Image (cartoon, rainbow, N blue to C red):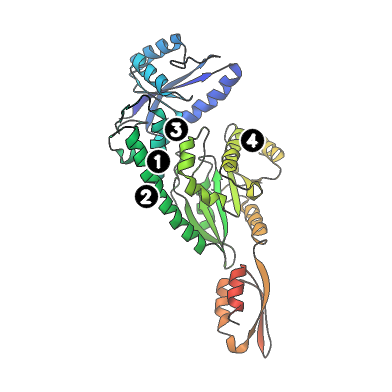
């Protein structure tokens, strides 16, 4: 049975109220992704938030009556709440209360599939719980069975500050071991050109990944459907492979504990040769969402020169003026539909242009007695031109420098 949810936001003034309307729409999508049934939402305009309950006394009493009338199970605040505010609200209204951060952590917990993702989410949850503990020896009781209460493995958690810190230490060591394993894997792939797909959650990264690689990957309209970084190869020129990684999506007010915990996964973005920042062209507040992603990429140390802005889902824009406005505002961006394949050649041409800075052209002169090398050349390089005479084969090829070096050593 779904939990009945009310969403709440506090705006400082009328101007901020309109921003909060969009924020609550996103919060609704998050709550539904977590399995909740959103019964309603409201915004209070209040310049000075209450230190005790965030909302004013009158609004809290109004909220209490609404919860009783509609049998509400959960309150979700878009604003960040302190531990004491949560406790005070719950004592007055008698309904479990969480904020946006706890909701996002809950969704991440639901969608973690691999061992690495599970460790990362647990670390983020425990780091968050540690900040929510108040008072010496305070015991945090968390029962799996409701939105925002989901713990690692959905087991009951009753841990104090000392035990949480001990578990965090263990998780960090485990993730460090996984990080070293990933670094070894990256070393083996280091001669390939690498692309990272990044962007706001639900921008269509997995769809683009599937279109480019022809791989069968999980695609969902739900937010944060992809938590585990997936890397596959595809050919941009014949026999010239590129590695592309589909990464976790970003969102407004992403808990800093998640960014810290997913550092190893986000490293795939940082070390890439090209970062495709995918944007849902149909979304509200496009510029705000672009800036949110930009800020996170900057925070993890990504080189701005590697980032290319790509607007997706242009097939869903019903008015041409919308597309024209975006093109005018972002003249250097590329506009595609990953689902329909619209304008993908523009994206591929950009990739070709970037990878050509890495690839080398070389004319290989192969003696006739070493003709057995032709098969390897045709398998590992893009052959531009082929000539032969009585003594040798002359083959102009395009490939990665290390592959050319390996072939030259055999001639």
The quarter of the picture where the N terminus appears is: top left
x then y, percent, for residue 80: 47, 25
Give the mark nearest the N terminus, 1 or 4: 1
Labelled pair 2, 4 in contact (Cβ < 8 Å): no
Residue designated by label 3: 30
Tell me how far mark 3 sits from mark 2, CA to CA.
Answer: 24 Å
Which label was assigned to residue 115?
2
* Label 2 secondary element: helix
**Residue annotated with mark 4:** 319
Q: Is residue 82 above or below residue 196?
A: above
Badge 3 crowding class, 10 Å Cα cut-off, few under 14, some 14 to 19, many 20 or more, is many
- N-terminal label among 2 and 4: 2
Question: Taking 11 as reference, is 286 above or below it?
Answer: below
Quote the CA–CA distance across marks 2 and 1.
12 Å
Ranked by sequence position, the earlier of labels 2 and 1 is 2
Q: Does residue 225 appear anywhere in the picture? A: yes
């Amino acid at each position: 049975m779904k939990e009945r949810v009310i969403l709440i936001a506090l705006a400082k003034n009328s101007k901020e109220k309109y921003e909060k309307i969009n924020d609550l729409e996103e919060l609704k999508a998050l709550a539904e992704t977590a399995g909740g049934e959103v019964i309603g939402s409201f915004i209070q305009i209040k310049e000075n938030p209450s230190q005790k309950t965030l909302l004013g006394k009158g609004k809290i009493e109004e909220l209490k009556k609404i919860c009783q009338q509609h049998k509400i199970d959960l309150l979700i605040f878009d604003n960040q709440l302190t531990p004491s505010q949560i406790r005070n609200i719950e004592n007055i209204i008698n309904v479990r209360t969480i904020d946006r951060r706890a909701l996002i952590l809950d969704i991440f917990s639901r969608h973690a599939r691999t061992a690495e993702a599970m460790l990362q989410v647990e670390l983020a949850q425990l780091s968050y719980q540690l900040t929510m503990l108040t008072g010496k020896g305070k015991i945090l009781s968390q029962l799996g069975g409701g939105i925002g209460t989901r713990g690692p493995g959905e087991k009951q958690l009753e841990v104090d500050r000392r035990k949480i810190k001990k578990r965090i230490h263990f998780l960090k060591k485990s993730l460090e071991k996984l990080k070293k394993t990933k670094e070894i894997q990256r070393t083996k792939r280091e001669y390939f050109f690498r692309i990272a797909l990044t962007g706001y959650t639900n921008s269509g990264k997995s769809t683009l990944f599937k279109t480019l690689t022809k791989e069968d990957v999980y695609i969902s309209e739900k937010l944060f459907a992809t938590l585990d970084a997936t890397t596959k190869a595809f050919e941009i020129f014949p026999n010239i492979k590129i590695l592309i990684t589909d990464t976790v999506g970003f969102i407004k007010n992403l808990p800093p504990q998640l960014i810290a915990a997913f550092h190893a996964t986000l490293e795939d973005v940082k070390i890439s040769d090209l970062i495709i920042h995918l944007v849902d062209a149909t979304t509200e507040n496009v510029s705000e969402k672009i800036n949110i992603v930009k800020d996170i990429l900057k925070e993890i140390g990504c080189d701005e020169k590697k980032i290319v802005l790509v607007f997706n889902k242009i097939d869903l824009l019903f008015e041409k003026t919308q597309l024209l406005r975006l093109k005018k505002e972002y003249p250097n961006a590329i506009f595609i539909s990953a689902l329909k394949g619209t304008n993908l050649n523009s994206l591929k041409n950009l990739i070709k242009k970037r990878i050509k800075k890495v690839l080398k052209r070389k004319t290989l002169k192969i003696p006739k007695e070493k003709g057995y090398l032709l098969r390897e050349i045709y398998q590992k390089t893009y052959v531009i031109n082929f000539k032969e005479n009585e003594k040798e084969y002359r083959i102009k090829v395009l490939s990665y420098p290390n592959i050319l070096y390996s072939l030259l050593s055999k001639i």
